[in-house]
């Protein structure tokens, strides 16, 4: 019976790998929520409406929530999303800008603002949002999704 030779990984390499895994854990755990905002329970009914593509209904629910939480960047981001999905681009832009004024690193608002720019044929502005996301995260869903949207836009020749 043969045995494989024992390989030893230097302690510095093991420490570096462990540090990288630990550093990535918050990003990886945030990516598994499956929702558009990061897991806030008060938004679960809104997610259901969005899943059903009832964007007007979701916007109405979000307006109620905003009355109670006027400076909630997640609510503002989702108001932008629901208005954009209804083709109300100017209103969506205002919500995204307000969300980003409150939280300049709101990854969802950066992604969706980039998508709005693509829908309104401003790919250079979408690229700027992607650059901001690249500064914020490496593995995040928002960066990956906006990258894919920009690639699709470019491939379509728009």
Image (tube, rainbow, N blue to C red):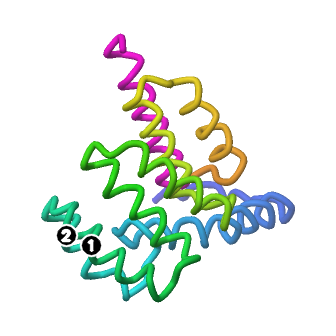
Residue drawn at x 44%, y 79% as measured from the top left: 66
Q: In screen coordinates, is 83 left or right of 104?
A: left
Picture coordinates of residue 132 (x, y %)?
68, 44
Residue drawn at x 70%, y 57% as measured from the top left: 7
Where, quadrant-wise, is the N terminus in this rendering? bottom left
Prevailing secondary structure class for the magenta stretch in the rendered image: helix
Secondary-structure class at tag 1: helix
In the picture shown, does residue 14 fall above or below 157?
below
Q: Residues within 10 Å of mark 1 (few under 14, many from 20)?
A: some
* Residue 139 colored in magenta in the image: no
Picture coordinates of residue 57 (x, y %)?
19, 69
Contact flag, marks 1 and 2 (Cβ < 8 Å): yes
Q: Which residue is mark 2?
A: 57
In the picture shown, does residue 121 fall above or below 95?
above
Residue drawn at x 69%, y 59% as measured from the top left: 104
* Residue 152 colored in magenta in the image: yes
In the picture shown, does residue 59 fall above or below 5?
below
- Residue 27 placement: quadrant: bottom right
Q: CA distance from mark 1 to mark 2?
A: 5 Å
Q: In screen coordinates, is 83 left or right of 19?
A: left
Q: Which mark is residue 60?
A: 1
Q: In screen coordinates, is 50 left or right of 29?
A: left
- Residue 89 placement: quadrant: top left
Residue drawn at x 47%, y 62% as measured from the top left: 77
Picture coordinates of residue 156 (x, y %)?
31, 16
Range shown magenta: 140-158
Instruction: Name the residue nearer the viewer: 11 or 80.
Output: 80
């Amino acid at each position: 019976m043969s045995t494989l030779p024992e390989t030893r990984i230097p302690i510095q390499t093991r420490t570096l790998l462990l540090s990288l895994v630990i550093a990535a854990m918050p990003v990886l755990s945030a990516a598994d929520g499956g929702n558009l905002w990061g897991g806030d329970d008060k938004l679960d009914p809104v997610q259901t409406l969005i899943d059903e593509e009832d964007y007007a209904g979701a916007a109405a629910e979000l307006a109620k929530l905003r009355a109670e939480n006027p400076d909630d960047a997640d609510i503002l981001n989702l108001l932008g999303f629901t208005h954009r999905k209804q083709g109300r681009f100017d209103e969506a832009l205002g919500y995204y800008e307000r969300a980003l004024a409150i939280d300049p690193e709101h990854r969802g608002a950066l992604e969706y603002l980039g998508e709005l720019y693509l829908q309104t044929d401003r790919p250079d502005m979408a690229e700027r949002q992607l650059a901001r996301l690249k500064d914020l995260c490496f593995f995040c869903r928002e960066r990956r999704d906006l990258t894919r949207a920009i690639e699709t836009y470019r491939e379509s020749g728009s």
